[in-house]
Image: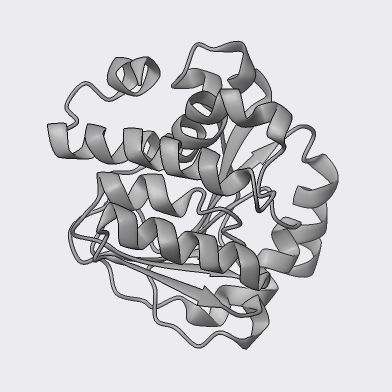
C-alpha cells in the first residue's frame, strides 16, 4: 500500500491492515463476480482505493456524518472511505444483487460496523443523509433527480450538504444539461484530482461537488 501511505501518512495500523485485507479479498471475489475489469485488478490500489479516497482530500467528514454511496458496485468509493472515517455512517446501494452480496461479505470480513449495504434502485430510497457520493455511475442530472430527496439540511461539516461525484473526461454536456434542468440547485464546482495525486491516471479525473 505504498500509494496510500504516500498520500495518507497518518493512517493507523488498523486502517492499513483493513486496506490490505480489502485488496486481498476483493481480488478473490472479483475472480468469481466481475465487479471491475480483471485486466484492471493489478491497479486496484491506485485506480479504485486511492481514487475513492480523493474525496477525503476534498473534505474531511466530521463524526456522525451520513453518506449514501449510489451505485456502489464493488464498494467504491464507500468502503475505502468507511475505513478512513469510522465514526461516519455509510449506506452503500446498488441495483445488482450479486454485487451487493459481495459488498456485504467484505463489510463482514473488514468488521465495518459503520456500513450498511442495500440492494435497491436509487429512485426507491428513503434515507436521511448529509452527502451523496458516487463514482462514474450515471450523468449528474440523473444522480440528482434520483437521490436529492434523501439529503437533509443538517450541517456537521465545513461544506454544505450535497453531492460529491467522482467523474472523468469531458463533462461539458453533462454540466450544461444539469444547469438547464436544475437551475435552482447549487453551483457546480469542479476539482481536478491531479491537484491531489501526481500519478498519470488522475490527469483526467475530477470531483464534481454541488450543494442541495
Quadrant of the image occupied by residue 119: bottom right
Q: Residue at x 20, y 66 (%)?
A: 64
Residue pushed farthest right? 173
**Image-based side of 25 in relation to 5, left or right:** right
* Left or right placement of residue 115 versus residue 49 in this view: left
Identify the residue shown where x is 76% and y is 32%. 169
Q: Which residue is depicted at the point 77% across and 40% down? A: 171
Q: Residue at x 52, y 42 (%)?
A: 28
Q: Is residue 33 above or below residue 168?
A: below
Residue 140's spot in the image, x, y percent?
Answer: 70, 57
Return the residue nearer the eye: 172 or 74.
74
Q: Position of residue 198 (x, y in %)?
A: 49, 11
Measured along the vertical axis of the image, is residue 89 above or below residue 24?
A: below
User: Where is residue 156 shown, x and y percent of the image?
Assistant: 23, 63
Asked whether residue 184 appears in the rendered view, the answer is no
Q: Position of residue 103 (x, y in %)?
A: 48, 60
Query: Where is 96 relative to 136, above or below?
Result: below
Closest to the observer: 187 or 121?
A: 121
Amino acid at each position: 500500500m505504498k500509494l496510500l501511505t504516500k498520500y495518507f501518512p497518518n493512517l493507523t495500523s488498523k486502517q492499513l491492515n483493513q486496506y490490505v485485507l480489502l485488496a486481498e479479498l476483493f481480488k478473490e471475489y472479483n475472480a468469481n463476480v466481475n465487479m471491475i475489469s480483471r485486466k484492471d485488478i493489478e491497479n486496484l490500489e491506485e485506480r479504485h482505493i486511492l481514487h475513492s479516497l480523493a474525496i477525503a482530500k476534498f473534505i474531511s467528514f466530521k463524526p456522525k456524518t451520513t453518506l449514501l454511496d449510489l451505485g456502489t458496485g464493488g464498494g467504491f468509493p464507500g468502503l475505502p472511505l468507511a475505513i478512513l472515517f469510522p465514526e461516519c455512517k455509510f449506506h452503500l446501494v446498488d441495483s445488482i444483487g450479486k454485487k451487493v452480496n459481495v459488498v456485504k461479505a467484505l463489510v463482514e470480513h473488514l468488521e465495518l460496523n459503520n456500513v450498511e449495504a442495500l440492494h435497491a434502485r436509487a429512485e426507491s430510497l428513503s434515507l436521511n443523509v448529509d452527502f451523496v457520493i458516487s463514482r462514474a455511475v450515471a450523468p449528474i442530472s440523473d444522480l440528482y433527480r434520483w437521490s436529492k430527496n434523501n439529503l437533509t439540511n443538517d450541517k456537521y461539516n465545513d461544506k454544505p450538504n450535497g453531492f460529491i461525484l467522482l467523474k472523468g473526461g469531458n463533462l461539458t454536456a453533462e454540466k450544461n444539461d444539469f444547469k438547464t434542468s436544475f437551475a435552482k440547485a447549487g453551483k457546480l464546482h469542479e476539482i481536478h484530482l491531479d491537484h491531489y495525486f501526481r500519478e498519470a491516471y488522475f490527469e483526467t479525473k475530477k470531483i464534481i461537488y454541488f450543494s442541495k
